[in-house]
Image (spheres, rainbow, N blue to C red):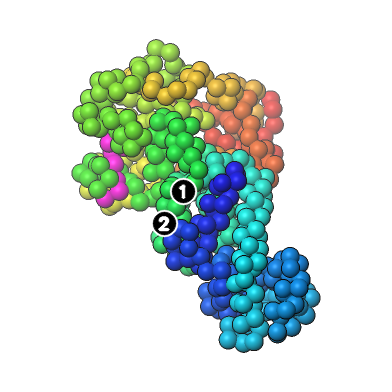
């Protein structure tokens, strides 16, 4: 993270921890006793950053170490002796006690405030290094969201949220996953604090340096559109419906989803009159798209690029995600276009699935982005067979190199199944290898593509 964004994030965390969710406001003298924030707390929480237990001890130690004379002069309750304790995990003095009053006075000094600012910014940098090591590099704004989560709920909370977040990570996608927490049955999760999460994303959008450039200009309109589709597909509040098809109740049909995703990305196809599959081609071509059907192989997916619009003008439309995947609004839980319940009732109403030739009779690609449009080396590897393999035991299939994302379309490969192993390999955060395989399947293309973990097959 750049230095300016470290400072911005410090102010954001101060705002949501002790400043009434107002950017630039904080309470350096904040003191919360045992159980003030939640029932399982056994120690005090202090300062603008709401440091708890041993972190509270560390803050006071930094103040003492930075100005020993000031600390000694103000230490009327023998806090110096308490700092020699091995742990403050059960340090439960009250705000009205002599020790509590002394702590508040010390952390409220100019030196105490300076130490709090330094401590918070050092923590932010440590968090960023750890997150990058575990989850890889990401834009500063996405990193700020991750640090907000880990500061609030710890490593486990961040791991849980990112496991549900589609890569590449962005602040908006992480926030969308946080917004799902209030709907699940588990209490006291980070996303359950809805006003906090809304305040954080709003402040990131407003104050993070070059947020629009980092997640806007660098994230092209094509990327914005495809990420919008992926976000809807990964959020069960969005299903399929042709009666309320523009998101009035959260649902879309195939064409309205694609049209709205590009409209949201800044390409005015909806405003220009696109309404369904039958008129999409003409309107899209007038708004910066090119017909690239002749340059791709719709049967195999070769030549497709992330964000391509896959169109059957009479029946259906989807978008290509890359990695042999497409995203689409498909059908409601009744297998019909009308009369279903709002939201995705089956997990397949609005989904990311393996690419298949529907069949598509038109592929549209947005040409308004200032980006290189050549097929990437990753996509070449994903479409090139390395060898044929036979599975030595049953193996689950996944839509990504992530054990939490089992495929719904092709959930299991049985022992003795034979597949094409492609040249593309990924490693997860633990260093485990995942292979990209092409599996025979009775569709128009003749196969689907999924990820499988290492150790389940042998090369023939």
Task: Confirm or deny contact between disc 2 and disc 1 (CB under 8 A).
Answer: no
Determine whether, in the image, residue 372 is placed left or right of residue 426: left
Alpha carbon separation for disc pair 2 and 1: 14 Å
Q: Residue at x 58, y 82 (%)?
A: 95
In this rendered view, identify the residue nearer to me: 72 or 267: 72
Task: State whether residue 55 is above or below residue 171.
Answer: below
Provide residue 134's location: percent of width, then percent of height.
65, 46
Label at residue 25? none
Q: Which residue is mark 2?
A: 198
In this rendered view, identify the residue nearer to me: 37 or 225: 37
Determine whether, in the image, residue 294 is placed left or right of residue 142: left
To which quarter of the image does residue 327 belong?
Answer: top left
Task: State whether residue 243 is above or below residue 91.
Answer: above
Q: Earlier along the polypeptide chain: callout 2 or callout 1? A: 2
Q: Is residue 253 magenta?
A: yes
Q: Which residues are magenta?
A: 249-257
Q: Which residue is mark 1?
A: 207
Q: Is residue 143 magenta?
A: no
Q: Residue at x 29, y 19 (%)?
A: 285
Determine whether, in the image, residue 130 is placed left or right of residue 139: right
């Amino acid at each position: 993270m750049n230095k300016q964004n470290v400072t911005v994030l410090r102010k954001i965390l101060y705002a949501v921890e002790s400043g009434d969710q107002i950017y630039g406001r904080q309470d350096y003298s904040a003191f919360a006793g045992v159980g003030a924030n939640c029932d399982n707390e056994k120690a005090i929480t202090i300062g603008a950053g709401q440091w708890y237990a041993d972190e509270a001890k560390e803050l006071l130690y930094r103040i003492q170490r930075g100005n020993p004379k000031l600390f000694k002069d103000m230490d009327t309750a023998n806090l110096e002796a308490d700092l020699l304790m091995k742990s403050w995990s059960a340090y439960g003095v009250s705000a009205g006690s002599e020790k509590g009053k002394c702590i508040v006075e010390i952390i409220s000094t100019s030196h105490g405030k300076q130490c709090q600012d330094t401590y918070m910014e050092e923590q932010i940098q440590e968090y960023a290094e750890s997150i990058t090591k575990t989850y890889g590099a990401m834009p500063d704004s996405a990193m700020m969201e991750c640090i907000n989560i880990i500061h609030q709920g710890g490593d486990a909370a961040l791991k849980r949220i990112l496991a549900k977040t589609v890569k590449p990570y962005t602040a908006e996608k992480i926030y969308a996953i946080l917004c799902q927490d209030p709907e699940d049955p588990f209490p006291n999760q980070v996303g359950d604090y809805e006003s906090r999460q809304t305040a954080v994303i709003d402040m990131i959008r407003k104050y993070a340096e070059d947020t629009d450039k980092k997640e806007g200009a660098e994230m092209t309109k094509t990327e914005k559109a495809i990420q919008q589709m992926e976000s809807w597909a990964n959020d069960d509040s969005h299903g399929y419906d042709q009666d309320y098809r523009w998101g009035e109740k959260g649902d879309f049909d195939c064409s309205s989803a694609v049209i709205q995703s590009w409209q949201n990305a800044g390409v005015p196809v909806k405003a220009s009159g696109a309404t369904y599959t039958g008129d999409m081609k003409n309107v899209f071509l007038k708004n910066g798209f090119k017909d690239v059907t002749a340059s791709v192989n719709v049967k195999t997916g070769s030549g497709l690029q992330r964000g391509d619009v896959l169109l059957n003008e009479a029946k259906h439309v989807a978008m290509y995600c890359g990695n042999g995947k497409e995203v689409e609004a498909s059908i409601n839980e009744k297998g019909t276009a009308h009369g279903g319940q709002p939201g995705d009732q089956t997990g397949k109403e609005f989904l990311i699935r393996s690419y298949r030739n529907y069949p598509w009779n038109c592929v549209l690609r947005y040409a308004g982005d200032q980006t290189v449009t050549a097929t990437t080396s990753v996509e070449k590897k994903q479409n090139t067979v390395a060898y044929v393999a036979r599975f030595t035991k049953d193996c689950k299939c996944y839509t990504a190199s992530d054990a939490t994302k089992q495929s719904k379309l092709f959930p299991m490969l049985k022992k003795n199944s034979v597949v094409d192993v492609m040249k593309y390999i990924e490693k997860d955060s633990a260093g485990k290898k995942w292979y990209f395989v092409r599996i025979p399947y009775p569709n128009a293309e003749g196969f689907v593509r999924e990820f499988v973990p290492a150790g389940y097959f042998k090369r023939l």
